[in-house]
Image: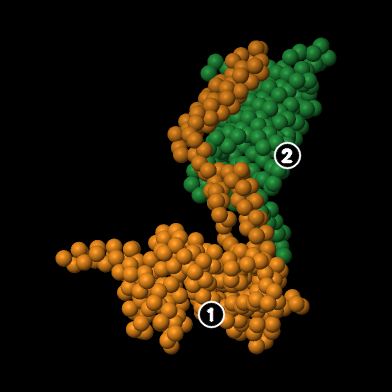
Chain colours: A green, B orange
Amino acid sequence: MTRAALGPLLLALALRPAAGQLVTVGPQFVLADYREVASGLRYRGNGVGGALWARRDRLSVEAAVVRLSFDPADGSAATAGFTATQVDAWVAYDVATYASVEVGVLHRSADPEFDAQSVGAVRVGARSFYQIGPGATVAFRANYLAAPKFSGGGHAAVSLDLGLGLDVRLAGRLHGTATYAFNRMNRRTNPGGTGEIDAPIQESLARAGLALAF
Amino acid sequence: MSRYLGAVVLLAGLAHPAVGTAQAAQNATLRRAQQAYDNLEYRQVLTLAQAALRERLTGAERARAYELLGFTYGAMDSILKAVDAFKQVVLLDPERQLDPNRVSPKAYSAFDVALRQVLLVRQLRVDSVSFVGGQGAVPVRFTVTQPARVVARAIGSGATVVIDSGAWNGQVNLRWPARLPGGDPVPAGTYTLVVDARLGQNTFSASQPIRVSHGRVDTLPSVTSLPGYQFLPETEIPPQSWRPVGLAFLYTGGALVGTLGLESSSLGSSSKRELGLVGAAALVTGFVMMLRKPAARPAQANILYNHLLRDQIARRNQDIAKENVARRQQLQVTVAPVSQVTPK
């Protein structure tokens, strides 16, 4: 068996639902707002991505990858846009009927590399979700972004991420999804050893898409 | 006209003291005695009835002749003679019974005294009954007119069983389990239930033929429900409420408050475009869900109730199965009287 054949087979096996298991996967359209250092440095962007969500009993896994093109917003001091690739991943465990605890990672890389900060962090938080109707679930999450690493150096003692999610079964296996995420990192940096200065980073993201359930 | 005649016949019947027993007498002398009694010619009744008794009469005619004498002596206030005549009547026909509403009190009391002066076993009755062998009994009842030593037995070709014995007087009620001394049911067949009464030198016996038959005991059908208990629906439609839109509003509000709280003052107010898009979708979804008919949800209490009910039914069916195993090894005993009591 070739590697090319093994990959899809493993993917198919991984996606095959067992009893008490549900998998959804689908594309997403993304809108984003990104700000860094000062109010004058702000970008607006959009892009596409994909999301995967899987549940087995009380354990669930969620991952989303988006590719964004940012352009300087009106009135921004920035002169050029950049492209960012953001990966979010969570592993959650239901501790109650309507709540789970979760851990995960956040990774955002910018291209060109020095036009914006690339960042990586570990997520720790909780999520509350509630079925508001047949096949419709609304969720709210709050994560602490621990030990963030920035491509330009520095540290952020307080970094938080919160989100709002909606999943609606539209017809049969077809789901509609919408996710809002807002994260803020109180980055402080010490350029040239002249003393620490604030260089906060703030991003808001809206994902809307369709997903197929298996 | 026919109505008038009917009323006359009815009145004549009511006026007649010896009600209902006298068949049309074949003996001419007895017929004349009856006619004389109807015409209230008592002296002639005495002459004719005594003459009839010297002739060849059937048992019923002889009893009727003595009965006419009893009524006539009663009417003539010769109570002792009336009692003697009625004694002969009950000896010839122990089952003879007078209706106190249709005979004179004098005649009735004379008849009652006569009954107490003669040892009789009367009104022997066996009820038809069917029961599982060993679990029931045959009701037997009779009347003993004087205190006497009484023995009740069932005599058949297969077995003779003593039902009970004792010193009894008046109404006696017995219960016969229809079992042999070993405990097994009596064999099927025809039996004669004999009641012997003894008082000094006087004895009297009454009997009643009965038929004992055996059959298989009916098995019980298994049950699918219990009387008075019904299965409940295991799902229920919750009432419509504002909860979906309320929750969507709560979650969206939480995201908005969180966003506003986390925004960095140095970066300025962030775009609310993203939150507006997702929040609006959540609110619209909540509103739609509020208007939609809610989905059926499991009714836990009903599910638990049904589970308990199924357990009870299963338990009852297990009991029925065990009982049926036992019933298949049992006999259904049916006892029925064959004919009326015959005096010995």
Residue B342's disc is 1
Q: Is residue B254 above or below residue B203?
A: above
Residue A135 placement, left or right of A60: left
Percent of width and height locating residue B204? 62, 77
Q: Nearer the viewer, residue B227 or B278?
A: B227
Residue B109 placement, left or right of A78: left
Q: Residue at x 71, y 24 (%)?
A: A160
Q: Residue at x 47, y 31 (%)?
A: B287
Q: Quadrant of the C terminus of chain B?
A: bottom right
Q: Chain of mark 2?
A: A
Q: Residues within 10 Å of mark 2 (few under 14, many from 20)?
A: many
Dot 2 falls on a residue whose secondary structure is: strand
Observer able to see residue B23 = no
Q: Label 2, on which residue?
A: A93
Observer able to see residue A133 = yes
Percent of width and height locating residue B145? 60, 67
Q: Is residue A84 above or below residue B329?
A: above
